[in-house]
Every structure is written in structure tokens, then in C-alpha cells.
Image (cartoon, rainbow, N blue to C red):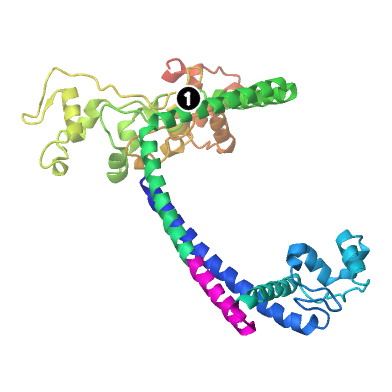
Amino acid sequence: MRNISSVLGRLAKSISISLVLLFAVTLTSKAQDAKEGAALFKANCTACHKIDRDMTGPALKGMTERHDEAWLVKWIKNSKALIDSGDPVAKKLFEDHNKIAMPAFTQFSDDQIKGIIAFVKEEEVKLAAGPAAGGAGAAGAAASSDASTFMVIGMAAILILAVGVIFILSRVTKTLEKVIANNQTAIDAAKARNEAIVESGKAKFAQKFLKNKKLVGFAALMVVALLAVLGWQTMWNVGVHTGYKPVQPIKFSHQIHAGVNQIECQYCHGGAFKSKNASIPSANVCMNCHNTITAADHYNGEISPELLKLYRAVDWNPDTRTYGENTRPIEWVRIHNLPDFAYFNHSQHVVVAGVECQTCHGPIETMEEVYQYSPLTMKWCVDCHRTTEVNTDNKYYDQLIEAHEKLKKGEKMTAAMIGGLECGKCHY
């Protein structure tokens, strides 16, 4: 609201300047038109017309009072065409002056004809002022003086008007600011009414929409299609936990251990070589290194706060370098979890097939916090089985070949000969 006064003030100034320029341009334009009209009149009209008396044509004095400017333009440009069109005024003028048609001046533009009319008006003013001034010279001087006085008075009047407009607008803006400040409640009420109108419009639209059965049917079909797509995507992703990264009780960094220090995965996850599960290492595996490595150089000589959690779990005293009896388990949160109906054997993939850990678990050596890299869906596993070549140069397939050779010879084959003694065959 504070800017209203300045905006309207600038607007008033612009209006004032525009009025002054418009006035000056109008006077200049009219003077220029009259000057050009005088030249055209003297060259084309004086043979038949005078201002104050009849000649071949009628006296021109008072013609703008008898006829409007648009009609005069048509008459001067082509009087015969106007008469032939049946214009009653043109026909009467033609008959009153011996039925002599005025020559056509189609070469003149409308503005040039208006200039001639302006010149005739000026000559009428001079003739009207002539007797009071006592002669033609005095008439011209009086007309010029009157014109100058009129311009000065007009300019003064415009300036006074502009000042008045600025003053009035300033007062109006102050009043408006007070009214707006004192009637904020009314404005809020008006907004509420507008919102009610909008809501009413929405209600009317809803009514019209509901009456259109085809449109309602199409909208329902689109909603059903959208829900079907969303439902399909949701059901397809049930049990898929790609990117799952839970918060662990100890911030163990695979990037530091497997990446920077290049510790083999199987040093901690030894079960990947010999069982179905890769297994989470017990705390004593961690203590193999961290009974001496405390990362104190990174914590101003103090033991790492994450290692203190490990020490509390195994009840290790780093000062006396002794274990206590108050041990507690570290409650790690499982990340990779297959459904119960899916059987996966780590040893079969790691030892027999020679699959790298990164094939399923991603770039584990770069992970500060471990997350599920692969979707571990049936489709993902099947796609891998379709493209992975089988390496038969291992003991597992040697046992199968040996078993088949015995079958060929008629000898008996036991389940133990084809891996029946593996724990994972029975124990999940």
C-alpha cells in the first residue's frame, strides 16, 4: 500500500506531460494542415469559390456548420458520385446551383481535404474579426494575437489541471490507504466470499460432470486403468528391497576394511565357502585385529567410539587387556533376506561356480554403509543362470561323473556321493 501514492503520482505526472504534448501536437498539426490547405485552395479552388460571396460555386462561409466534415470530404473528392448515389443533400446543392457539378479531386487524400476545410475555417475567423479591427491587416494581427493568447491560456489551464490532478490523486491515495488499513476485515470477508464463489463454481462443475454419463464413464475407465498399473507395479515390487540400508548398531565400514585395507571377504564371512549362509562374523573375529588397532590416531588419542561398542559387547578392558564375563550379543540388522521358499547356497555359487561376491552384493569394497545392491528377484536369478557358463573343472562335477560311471557298471549310488551329506540340504 505504501507504493500506491508513488505509483499514482508518477501516473499523474505522465498524464500531465501527455496532455501538454497532445495539446502542442494538436495545435501544430492543425496549423500545418491549414497551411497545406491554403496552398491547395489557392491552386485548385479560387477559380470557382470565395469565402464570403457566391461565384460559379457557392460562398464557402459557414459550410462546416451546414455539413459535417465527413460529408464534405466525400463531396470535394467526387461530388458526382455522391449525387449519383442519391444523397439528398448533394442533389439539392446540385440543383440550387444551376446543376453544375464540381470537378472531382480524387487525387487529394482525406487529410489534404481536411486541410482545405481547416483553411476555410481560419478565413472565416479572419473575416469575422475584420470589421471590429478596422481592416484586413488589423484582422490578421487580431487573429494572430487571439491565437497566441489562446495558446498561452490553454497551456496555463493544462498545467493547472495537471497540478490539480496530482494533488487530487495524492489525497485520494492517502484516503485509500487509510480505508484499506481500517477495513482489512472487509477485505478478508471479500476473499472468503470469493472463495465461496469458487467453491460454488466447482460444485456446479461437478454437477454438470456427473450428469454427463459418457464423460463419467471415460473418467472411471481411466481411473481403473491407472489403479491397475499402480497395483501391478506395487505387486511386482513386493519383497524387492533394492537400496535397503538399515542403521546398524555399530558403524562398520566395508570401504575401510575391504577397500582400503583389502581384507578378503571370506576372512569375516567364512561360511560362504562351506555352507548355505555366508554368516555374520562373531565378535572374536573382529577382536583378532581390534585388540590392538583402536583408531586412536583419528580421535585425538582416544579409542574410536564405534570400537568402544565392540569392547562393551565382548567385555574387553583395553587398559588391562583382559576379557570379562559380562558379554552381550551385537544385534546386527539383516540386509539380504530371501523368502523361505527360495533356496540359495553360498558355497555352491562361490566354490563350484566361482561367482565373485560383487556379482550379487555390488561394489561392497566401496560402501561406507552396506545396502542391498541387487533386487534378488526370481527374474534376476534366472537371467544370471541363462548367461553364466558352467565350469565343470571342480570336485563337485568329478563326484557326479564318478557316480554316473558306477551306475553304468551296475553299481549302487548313494545320496552321499551327490552331495547328500551337505548341511544345507536339510538345514536352512
**Image quadrant assignment for residue 111:** bottom right
Left or right for 396, reference 212: left
The residue pinned by badge 1 equals 344
Question: Is residue 143 part of the magenta span, yes or no?
Answer: yes
Q: Which residues are magenta?
A: 133-155
Asked if residue 38 shows in the view, the reply is yes
Point 40% across, 46% down: residue: 173
Q: Residues within 10 Å of mark 1 (few under 14, many from 20)?
A: few
Asked if residue 7 shows in the view, the reply is no
158 above or below 426?
A: below
Q: Quadrant of the C terminus?
A: top left
Q: Amino acid at mark 1?
A: Phe
Label count reads 1
Q: Nearer the viewer, residue 146 or 70?
A: 146
Q: How far across and how far down the image is residue 180, in percent?
A: 39, 37
Point 15% across, 37% down: residue: 294
Left or right for 421, reference 146: left
144 above or below 325?
A: below
Left or right for 109, reference 228: right
Q: Quadrant of the N terminus?
A: top left
**Image quadrant assignment for residue 263:** top left
Q: How far across and how far down the image is residue 221, in percent?
A: 69, 24
Disc 1 secondary structure class: loop
Q: Nearer the viewer, residue 404 or 117?
A: 117
172 above or below 191?
A: below
| Magenta span main SS | helix
Q: How far across and how far down the image is residue 122, in percent?
A: 66, 74
Q: Furthest-left residue in view?
A: 320
**Image quadrant assignment for residue 227:** top right
Q: How far across and how far down the image is residue 290, in percent?
A: 18, 34
Q: Nearer the viewer, residue 117 or 356?
A: 117
